[in-house]
Amino acid sequence: MKRFFMFVNLVLTLAIIVVCFTGCQKDSNDIKIGAILPLTGDAAKYGDIAKKSFDMAVNEVNASDGIKGKKIKIIYEDSQGNPQLGVSAVQKLISTDRVISIMGDLFSYVTLAIAPIVEKNKIVLLSPASSAPKITEAGDYIFRNCPSDVYEGNVMANYAYDKLNMKKVALLYVNNEYGIGIKDVFKESFSKKGGTIIDEESFEQNTTDFRTQLAKIKQSNPEAVYLVGYKEMGYILKQAKEMKIRPQFLSTVMFEDPDILKIAQEGADNVIYSASSFDTKNDDNPIVQSFVKSFNDKYGQMPDIFAGLSYDAMKIMIIAIEQGGNTSEGIKKALYNIKNYQGVTGEVSFDSNGDAILTPVIKKVENGKFVFVR
């Protein structure tokens, strides 16, 4: 009987070893990329469309035998747009999942929270949408394929002063890294040109009542109001129309959100904002149209700017892994060497800080639609 139990234990041990070995072998054939996105919570709609784009880009590559015969596996973690959860997520991806690179986050304040950790561990991080100026100096392993707020803030400040002949502007911005960063850039650039910032009002993210801030702005009587925020901008414009506040409203690429138009309705008419060159309907570039058709066919919805930036980000990361191999140093070097990558959101190169070299364009709202101005 004793020999029988010894035999059973030996068989079980061998079975465990075989399962572990085959599992580890299978896992070793995967190239693991981490992704930190707001998949639940108030910002889930942004994370959802970014995830769809990541998945689509990876599925396209995996269908063509992956990278040198190895399949790409994305390991997702949910930040909920919360810096603390982002920190926990990145620690897990690095120490437990042992990913070779990380995508995300979409929000600057989450990206800035996790940047010191990836920098310390020498893991490359590529964000599709974090635009705060502080990210420029976040580290040698931190990249983004969206324009910094420095570009966007300067573009709108110059356009307001030179093209719209605006000399008195009020600022209304979300009180976080993103909002403060871009309003500071606009303020400095506009002031240097000779313009005057006559009022500054802030609000917390997810606020829905802006009548106090709008009343103060109305009293200061600006020629234009520079809005920086997220879906809150829809409520701001709706309430501004109700309060008969009629300056020229200016904004950022974040304004290109159909939900803002639904909330603001006619209040969004004639808002001018800086944007990327991504245009799902009017751009006849075959790369853009192929992406739009594939995304719409697969998910039953039109891709937005977050979809385009996220798709480009994953494609760029895949190229960097193909060229740089499975090491952080190789991936980092390959990203710095990427020049004029033709993505769906335009040509992308990276400067010495890991920032995308892009030129935002100017768009506006006409009859409930986003259209190009120049």
Image (tube, rainbow, N blue to C red):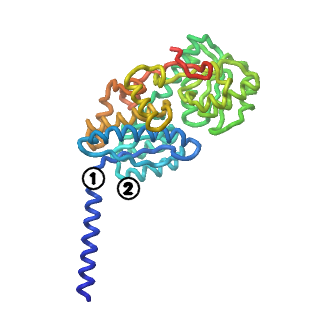
Q: Which mark is residue 28?
A: 1
Q: Earlier in the sequence, mark 2 or mark 1?
A: 1
Residue 23 % position (x, y) = 29, 59
Which residue occupies 23% across, 86% down?
3
Residue 374: x %, y % from top left: 50, 14
| Residue 203 left/right relative to 58 | right
Camera-nearest label, 2 or 1: 1
Task: Provide residue 137's location: percent of width, then percent of height.
Answer: 43, 34
Asked if residue 139 is positioned above or below residue 285 in the image, the reply reads below
Q: Secondary structure at mark 2?
A: loop
Disc 2 target residue: 96
Task: Tell me where residue 172 sits by quadrant.
Answer: top right
**Gap in angstroms between the C-alphas marked 2 and 1:** 14 Å
Residue at the (64%, 24%) spot, across then down: 268
Judge by depth and name the residue closer to the eye, 120 or 257: 257
Tell me the quarter of the picture where residue 224 sits: top right
Q: Residues within 10 Å of mark 1 (few under 14, many from 20)?
A: few
Report whether residue 133 is seen.
no
Q: Nearer the viewer, residue 138 or 232?
A: 232
Q: Residue flagged by tag 1: what amino acid is it? A: Ser
Q: Residue at x 55, y 27 (%)?
A: 256
Q: Nearer the viewer, residue 4 or 37?
A: 4
| Local secondary structure at mark 1 | helix
Q: Is residue 76 visible?
A: yes
Q: Is residue 26 left or right of residue 109?
A: left
Task: Report whether 253 appears left or right of 245.
Answer: left
Q: Which amino acid type corresponds to the residue marked 2 in the rendered image?
A: Thr
Q: Residue at x 58, y 32 (%)?
A: 179
